Amino acid sequence: MSRFSVRRLALAILCAAMASGPAEAEELPLLPPAEAEELPLLQPTRVLLFGRAETAGPAVVSAVAVSPDGMLLAAAGDDHQVRIWGLSDGHVIHELEGHTDWVRCAAFSSDGSQLATGGNDRRLHVWDVKSGRLLRSLSGNRQVVSALAYSSDGKQLAAAGFHSRVTIYEPLAGARVRELDGPCDDIRTVTFSPGGQRLAAAGRNGVIRLWNAQTGQPLRDISAHRRRVRTLVFSPDGTRLASGGEGRDVSIWQTETGRREKSLPSPSAKVLATVFMDNNTLAVGGSDNQIYQWDLLSQQVTRRMVGHTGSVATLAYAPMQRLLISGSFDTTVRLWNLSPVEEDRAARHQTSKVK
């Protein structure tokens, strides 16, 4: 094994340790064992190994994003590269080179023509998706770029990181539109509402800050969690905001009032990733290597997705294909087919196990 491969293996182990924190007693499962066994258990339909084994070996996956039409998947990690796959066949279309350190975040524009990426090298790149060409490199980031989000009209790109500001860019022109004071140092997540009216960000201190996305005026602060928030996501209709993080809980907020609507039973793991699949269905991934599908109406877990052997760091969803995509510290990207046919197959398999 080469020195670089040993270094990458050590880094992957360190990433898992960072996600799980100091050594603790064995974590309890999300549900009692009997109930967990009764849940439909879904295996991935495709596994993509991230990185090039012939060089430095597989790489930790820290970001996945799916194009608006559900045809393309972008993934990035600690090997400094960004890959774009075709979701229909799993073939790599582009390998984007331009970062010099860990790539932590990636986001497609609303029309799918641009891909923005950022990371530890403090660089924010905007790529042409069709050609793979670097369109613009947005400079001036003082710290690591840990989170990116496009507005629904594609005219604004929000960037945040290991500091207290959220910077809004006009991505193609490369101009800074404004800088917003964040709720804390070390912001880990930023997101626009689907209609583009609101912007939300959160990080180390557990406070979510909401702004008017058009004017940059603060709307409210929500004291959401006692520990670092890792993930924020708006529901497709924009009326709810889900948050989760190192406090091992998931909360659902009404965006209009800032009131907590639901608090999901605390998972056994730190919550690292969430994605709405529809207005009442939320997928949650974390440091127990599993993905849970929640029905928000009943506040029940309806499915468990297993297969990852490292923390689930990032999630994306292609609604037209009913395809969930997950990236993990285990160096893989996994695709989960949630079509009715696959649901029926999983249910039949689960029934046969308990006969």
Image: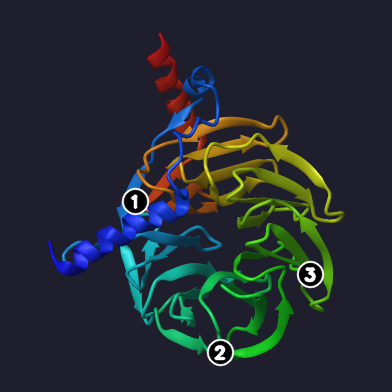
Q: Which of the two discs, 1 and 3, labels the residue nearer the N terminus? A: 3
Q: Which of the two discs, 3 and 2, labels the residue nearer the N terminus? A: 2
Q: CA distance from mark 1 to mark 3?
A: 36 Å
The extreme right residue here reads 257
Contact flag, marks 2 and 1 (Cβ < 8 Å): no
Label 1's element? loop
Q: Quadrant of the N terminus?
A: bottom left
Q: Given the image, on which type of amino acid does mark 3 rest?
A: Trp
Contact flag, marks 1 and 3 (Cβ < 8 Å): no
Residue 60 in view here: yes
Q: Residue at x 46, y 48 (%)?
A: 20
| Category of crowding for the residue at label 1, using alpha-carbon neighbours closer than 10 angstroms: few (below 14), some (14–19), many (at least 20) | many
Above or below residue 278? Residue 265 is above
Q: Quadrant of the C terminus?
A: top left
Q: CA distance from mark 2 to mark 1?
A: 32 Å
Q: Given the image, on which type of amino acid does mark 2 rest?
A: Gly
| Category of crowding for the residue at label 2, using alpha-carbon neighbours closer than 10 angstroms: few (below 14), some (14–19), many (at least 20) | few
Label 3's element? strand
Q: Given the image, on which type of amino acid does mark 1 rest?
A: Asp
Q: Which residue is mark 2?
A: 140
Q: Which residue is mark 1?
A: 330
Q: Residue at x 46, y 52 (%)?
A: 19
Query: Which quadrant of the figure has residue 32?
Result: top right
Picture coordinates of residue 214, whole percent (x, y): 79, 76
| Residue 1 as seen in the image, left or right of residue 221 | left
Q: Which residue is mark 3?
A: 211
Above or below residue 243? Residue 351 is above
Question: 345 or 181: which is nearer to us?
Answer: 181
| Residue 146 as seen in the image, left or right of residue 327 | right
Residue 319 in view here: no
Label 2's element? loop
Picture coordinates of residue 346, whole percent (x, y): 44, 27
